[in-house]
Amino acid sequence: MKKTFYLLLAIIAFYGCQSGSANTELNLSEILASYIESYKNTISVDTTYRSGNDTVRVQFSYRCLMDSSIVVPRRYVEMYGMDKFVTHNFASSIIIQKNRKTVVDRKIVKSDFNAVLEEHLKEYGTLLYPYIYYYADSVRVNYSLSFPLTDVGIGVSAVIRKDSSVSFSDR
């Protein structure tokens, strides 16, 4: 009886590990496929809101630049079975109008955040997952500036104020 118990325990442990390994590989392949699919997706926002007596219109677009300018080294992508991962930068464009007058019309790119980035993020990072906040006196766009396919990165923000000034910071 004792031998049967240990044999059964060994079989469960063996197949349990095999199943976990297959699930990990499947999850990694799903992550990679989803990331590559994001190259084709553009996020667009066109909204208007009232701020006191002002009417503010925000037009925002986020897209992949398809520039093949980022080469993520093996140490960050070996779990995917890759020696390196060649990918692209992402960027946003934002136009803000106050009472039908354009106050901001600019691009937001990774280099805008250089003052708060370490060298490895300047080299391998890209702007991911934009999220927009609307305030009475400003618009803030948050990003994850991260190595693609990893959790290595930092949160960054671009704040555009009513006076058309723009600041870039980490969060």
Image (tube, grey):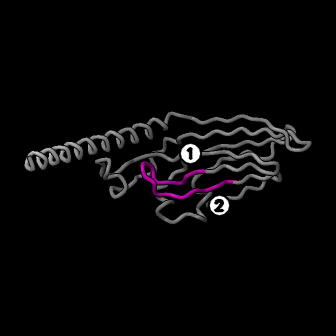
Label 2, label 1: how far apart the Cα atoms are? 16 Å
Pick the residue in front: 68 or 94: 94
Residue 20, magenta (yes or no)? no
Q: Which residue is mark 2?
A: 169
Query: How many numbered discs sit on the rendered protein?
Result: 2
Give the residues drawn in magenta, as a range: 143-158
Q: Look at mark 1 in the image and give the residue it sits on.
A: 129
Q: Secondary structure at mark 1?
A: strand
Name the residue rendered at 71%, 34% in the picture.
Answer: 46
Q: Position of residue 93 (x, y in %)?
A: 66, 43
Disc 1 crowd, CA 10 A, few/some/many (<14, 14-19, 20+): few
Of the pair 39 and 67, the residue shown nearer to us? 39
Marked residue nearer the N-terminal end (2 or 1): 1
Question: Of helix, strand and loop, which one carries label 2?
Answer: strand
- Residue at x 23%, y 47% (from the top left corner): 17
Q: Where residue 53 appears, x then y in whole percent?
A: 92, 42
